[in-house]
């Protein structure tokens, strides 16, 4: 009987895709996927650090593995991802949970095979060098007929609330020829949807003199085959007209744009270091709607950023109504250690953040109802 693995993934699509890489390595090593965590010989938690809640869940769920390890000492338990890319968090997990065998971060994911086969008792692999992406890692794709294709890693934007630039490093684009080769392969394998992934896809190519994002999109669409293309995530400050034009003109591109606004107040946008104003954002939305009439626009909103007053929040609600989004992901601001916003005065209370998030959910419902009744 073959050995089995079970991977639990927290957070964004990039993590889902990286779990596909871990699964690819495990498959190559002869493991099979287990339906139940109890039957697994290798258990992996691929973690997220974006908000406190995500980290708390990891501490709770890893703690619960103690019993499984006690029943079978040969089980290998590994914790990796954005949370363990932070040295203090990795150290804390290592000390708190002696039954965890391997701890590593996003920067050394490509070394997982080496870690798995190491004979040392416990391993805490911490590395700040993000330069090696690990181009030739195997995949075991797990998202139905959608294939995730990573086009870039990292982020240079340093939005003041966000931990991502610290746990994913600076922007690194993959070579367009490697990306196109991978897409040709997945199209040949029969995948019907290709989702291009990156923290800030509109910056593609800027770090290494590669072609720009709109040119990459055009080349992807030139590949023969019956498939659709989506991408995430776009930063409004970098979404240029040429990208909007490619989406408008090319049938292979899905008419969907996820364009996180975060706040509708200029004061808060500035404090967030988002580098656009509400007016600029609304003008991009207008251009998108004019050029792509059947477009679906979705967004991310953070409520309760430090110093957000009722008036600032009202500005966000007003912007939401103006854009009339097709989907909203609303989050309560969560303090992240080491970010600039951590030290900002006037943190908003949990109760107030909760009220604001619920108000946005309500607004989203009303917009949806209006759309179902035939309004815009
Ligand atoms: N608190 C709450 N939400 C956050 N996001 C990023 N950092 C934080 C934070 N500290 C949200 C943003 C981003 C999405 C992926 O997560 O809205 O677009
Ligand atoms: Fe975080 Fe801002 Fe980078 Fe997005 S653009 S990953 S919110 S720092």
Image (cartoon, rainbow, N blue to C red):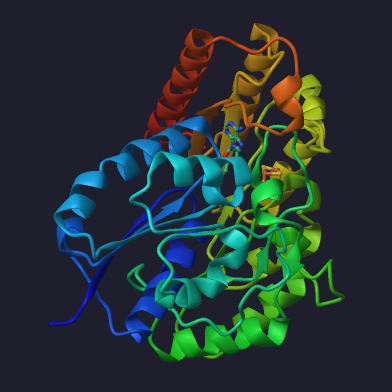
- Looking at the rendered image, the quarter that the N terminus falls into is bottom left
Extreme residue in the right direction? 209
Above/below status of 309 relative to 238: above
Q: Is residue 140 visible to the viewer in this orientation of the structure? A: no
Q: Nearer the viewer, residue 118 or 325?
A: 118
* Vertical order, 342 against 143 (above or below): above
Between 84 and 121, the one nearer to me in the picture:
121
Q: Is residue 353 left or right of residue 34?
A: right
Residue 283: image quadrant is top right
In this view, 135 is above or below 319: below
Location of ligand 1 given as a quarter of the image: top right
Q: Quadrant of residue 260?
A: top right
Residue 357's spot in the image, x, y percent? Answer: 49, 21
Q: Is residue 218 visible?
A: yes
Q: Which residue is more in the foreground, 221 or 25?
A: 25
In-image side of 311 versus 156 (left or right)? left
Q: Position of residue 236 (x, y in %)?
A: 74, 46
The location of residue 116, given as percent across then percent down, is 41, 73
Residue appearing at x 55%, y 85% in the figure: 182
Q: Which residue is rendered at x = 45% and y = 32% of the image?
A: 53
What is the number of callouts on the image? 0
Residue occupying the point 70% across, 76% down? 174
Please give left or right for residue 31 compared with residue 350 in the image: left
Answer with the quarter of the image where residue 7 lies: bottom left
Residue 93 is left or right of residue 295, and the answer is left
């Amino acid at each position: 009987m073959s050995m089995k693995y079970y991977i639990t993934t927290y957070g964004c699509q990039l993590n889902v895709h990286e779990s596909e890489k871990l699964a690819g390595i495990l498959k190559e090593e002869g493991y099979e996927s287990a339906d139940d965590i109890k039957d697994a010989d290798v258990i992996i938690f691929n973690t997220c650090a974006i908000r406190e809640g995500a980290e708390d869940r990891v501490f709770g769920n890893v703690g619960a593995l103690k019993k499984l390890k006690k029943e079978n000492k040969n089980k290998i338990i590994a914790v990796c991802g954005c949370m363990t890319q932070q040295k203090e968090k990795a150290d804390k997990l290592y000390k708190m949970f002696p039954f965890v065998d391997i701890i590593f971060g996003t920067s050394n994911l490509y070394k997982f095979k080496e870690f798995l086969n190491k004979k040392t008792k416990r391993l805490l692999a911490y590395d700040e060098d993000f330069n090696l992406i690990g181009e030739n890692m195997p995949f075991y794709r797990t998202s139905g007929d959608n294939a995730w294709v990573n086009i870039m890693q990292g982020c240079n934007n340093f939005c003041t609330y966000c931990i991502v630039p610290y746990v994913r490093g600076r922007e690194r684009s993959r070579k367009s020829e490697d990306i196109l080769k991978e897409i040709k392969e997945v199209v040949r394998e029969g995948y019907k949807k290709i989702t291009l992934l990156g923290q800030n896809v509109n910056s593609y190519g800027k770090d290494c003199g590669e072609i720009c994002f709109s040119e990459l999109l055009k080349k992807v669409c030139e590949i023969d085959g019956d498939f659709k293309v989506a991408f995430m995530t776009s930063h409004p400050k970098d979404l240029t007209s040429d990208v909007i034009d490619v989406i408008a003109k090319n049938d292979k591109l899905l008419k969907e744009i996820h364009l996180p606004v975060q706040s509708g107040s200029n004061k808060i946008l500035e404090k967030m270091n988002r580098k656009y104003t509400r007016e600029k954002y609304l003008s991009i939305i207008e251009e998108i709607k004019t050029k792509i009439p059947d477009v679906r626009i979705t967004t991310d909103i953070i409520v309760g950023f430090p110093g957000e007053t009722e008036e600032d929040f009202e500005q966000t609600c007003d912007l939401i109504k103006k854009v009339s989004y097709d989907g909203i992901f609303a989050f309560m601001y969560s303090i992240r250690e080491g970010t600039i916003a951590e030290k900002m005065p006037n943190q908003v209370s949990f109760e107030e953040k909760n009220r604001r998030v619920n108000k946005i959910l309500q607004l989203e419902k009303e917009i949806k109802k209006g759309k179902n009744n035939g309004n815009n």
